[in-house]
């Protein structure tokens, strides 16, 4: 990583504070591609002695209530039995593990606090929440609630969010990231341009990209060696998130048709589950080898969790596709999703696959309606209006005794990062 000395220092100090037994909360803010995720990766590298859980919001997943929170907490659920009964019931309904009355948001928040406190009882806990602007709203609200009520637990909650997004996190401690300094930006550029670069071109690239690392890294892909060396070249494709996305779209369109369709499967599947991806590819009759050109182009990494080079590549893939293609892909994903294990996500894919009113889809949505209904955030109240004091501010007194009782058990899990 180039530069970022002050930011890395701030993060080291945050981790040292948690190691000494206090909680810490931080929201890393900055524009697309500025290096927020890179800093989150840096934090996780600092914390080999921590338990580490992580989630990243995905644009297309915003509507699935509690999906982000569930993903973050899944590795901590081994402490579930230590929670008081009302918290267990609330969490069960929120996470779709059981059907019941609308969960009280306050209880869900307390349950998450209890889980984190129980996990941190044995080993400091680092929770990384990337792309918080794309997490479903109720998950962010719950995490903001938790962030405001942590006490002396060795828990670090580190969020990353794009500038001007995730207003629910406003008021929490922030670290604002801007572009790299000119000298760091020049170094980064030199490191990715194999040949000679005309100094005037280099300085212009640094100025026009405002030191945004993602933009700096895209430049060599958009300019030929001759343009870089000769002082010519149109840099317009590298300046803003929108222009970067266009540059990704061009790269995706240059790939074979089947490769593009497989990329669309990966882009439409928010969790990045490779097994589900493979089943959907089989449903479409596309051999998985067709993904190879995308891997070779550095667009996506195939593994148990599929990773796009960058969230902008994922959104470029999805937004560039025809509506009809997206429907076919969502149909394949719905068919590949286990209706017993993940009925809500299956219904969500099916709904995205439907061209219009559709009896089968309606029936499927109906089937999981009881649970979905109680989990879904409704504007202006609904399940989330049950406790109006949930959102922001110091809120109601913490049920400390309630929580402390839950944090006495021993951790039976391996003490490692997940
Ligand atoms: N300080 C740095 N030095 C070198 N490369 C960096 C640095 N910061 C970020 N990068 C690289 O720049 C690219 C974009 O960074 P990153 O994904 O962290 O941005 P981001 O702020 O998380 O963007 P987004 O808001 O879209 O999620 C990545 O390839 C990353 O490895
Ligand atoms: Mg990021």
Image (cartoon, grey):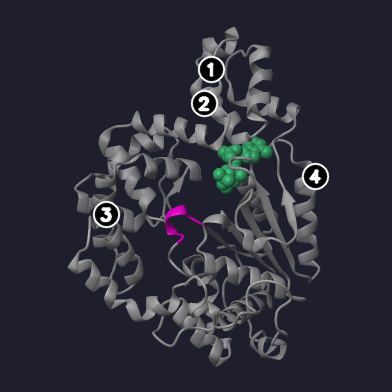
Would you name the residue on which mark 3 appears? 280
Would you name the residue on which mark 1 appears? 234
Work out how far the residue at label 1 is from the one at label 3, CA to CA, in angstroms: 40 Å
Q: Which residues are magenta?
A: 57-62
Q: Nearer the viewer, residue 68 or 262?
A: 68
Would you name the residue on which mark 2 appears? 237
**If you read the primary sequence from the N terminus, does the residue marked by circle 1 or circle 3 appear first?**
1
The picture quadrant where one finds residue 262 is: top left
* 416, above or below 94, in the image: above
- Mark 4 neighbour class, 10 Å CA radius: few under 14, some 14 to 19, many 20 or more: few
Name the secondary structure under disc 3.
Answer: helix
Q: Are marks 1 and 3 in contact (CB under 8 Å)?
A: no
- Mark nearest the camera among 2 and 3 is 2
Name the secondary structure under disc 1.
Answer: loop
Q: Is residue 146 left or right of residue 323?
A: right
Q: Identify the residue at horizontal 70%, vertical 79% (top origin).
A: 395
The picture quadrant where one finds residue 364 is: bottom left
Whether 60 is among the magenta residues is yes
Q: Identify the residue at horizontal 45%, vertical 36% (top origin).
A: 298
Residue 210 seen in render: yes
**If you read the primary sequence from the N terminus, does the residue marked by circle 2 or circle 3 appear first?**
2
Work out how far the residue at label 4 is from the one at label 3, CA to CA, in angstroms: 45 Å
- Mark 2 neighbour class, 10 Å CA radius: few under 14, some 14 to 19, many 20 or more: many
Name the secondary structure under disc 2.
Answer: helix
């Amino acid at each position: 990583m180039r530069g970022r000395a002050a930011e890395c220092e701030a993060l080291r100090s945050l981790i040292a504070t948690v190691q000494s037994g206090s909680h810490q909360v931080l929201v890393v803010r900055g524009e697309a591609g500025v290096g927020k995720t890179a800093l989150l990766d840096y934090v996780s590298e600092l914390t080999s002695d921590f338990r580490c859980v992580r989630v990243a919001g995905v644009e297309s997943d915003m509507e699935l209530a509690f999906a982000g929170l569930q993903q973050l907490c899944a590795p901590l659920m081994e402490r579930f039995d230590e929670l008081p009964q009302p918290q267990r019931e609330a969490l069960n309904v929120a996470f779709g593990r059981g059907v019941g009355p609308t969960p009280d948001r306050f209880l869900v928040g307390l349950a998450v606090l209890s889980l984190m406190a129980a996990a941190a009882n044995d080993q400091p806990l680092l929770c990384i929440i990337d792309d918080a602007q794309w997490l479903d709203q109720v998950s962010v609200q719950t995490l903001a609630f938790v962030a405001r009520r942590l006490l002396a637990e060795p828990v670090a909650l580190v969020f990353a969010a794009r500038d001007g997004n995730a207003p629910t996190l406003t008021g929490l401690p922030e670290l604002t990231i801007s572009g790299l300094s000119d000298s760091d930006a020049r170094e980064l550029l030199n490191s990715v341009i194999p040949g000679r670069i005309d100094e005037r071109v280099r300085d212009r690239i640094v100025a026009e990209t405002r030191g945004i690392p993602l933009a700096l890294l895209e430049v060599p892909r958009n300019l030929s060696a001759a343009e870089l060396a000769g002082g010519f070249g149109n840099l317009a494709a590298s300046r803003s998130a929108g222009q970067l996305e266009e540059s990704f779209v061009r790269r995706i369109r240059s790939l074979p048709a089947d490769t593009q369709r497989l990329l669309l499967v990966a882009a439409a599947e928010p969790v990045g589950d490779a097994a589900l991806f493979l089943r959907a590819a089989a449903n479409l009759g596309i051999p998985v080898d067709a993904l190879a050109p995308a891997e070779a182009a550095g667009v996506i990494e195939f593994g148990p969790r599929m990773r796009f080079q960058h969230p902008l590549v994922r959104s470029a893939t999805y937004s560039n596709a025809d509506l009809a293609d997206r429907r076919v892909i969502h149909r394949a994903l719905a068919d590949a999703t286990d209706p017993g294990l993940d009925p809500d996500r299956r219904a969500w894919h099916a709904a995205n696959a439907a061209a219009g009113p559709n009896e089968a889809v309606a029936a499927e949505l109906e089937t999981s309606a009881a649970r979905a209904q109680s989990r879904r955030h409704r504007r202006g109240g609904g399940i989330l209006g049950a406790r109006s004091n949930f959102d922001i501010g110091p809120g109601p007194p913490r049920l400390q005794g309630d929580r402390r009782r839950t944090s006495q058990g021993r951790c039976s899990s391996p003490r490692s990062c997940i």
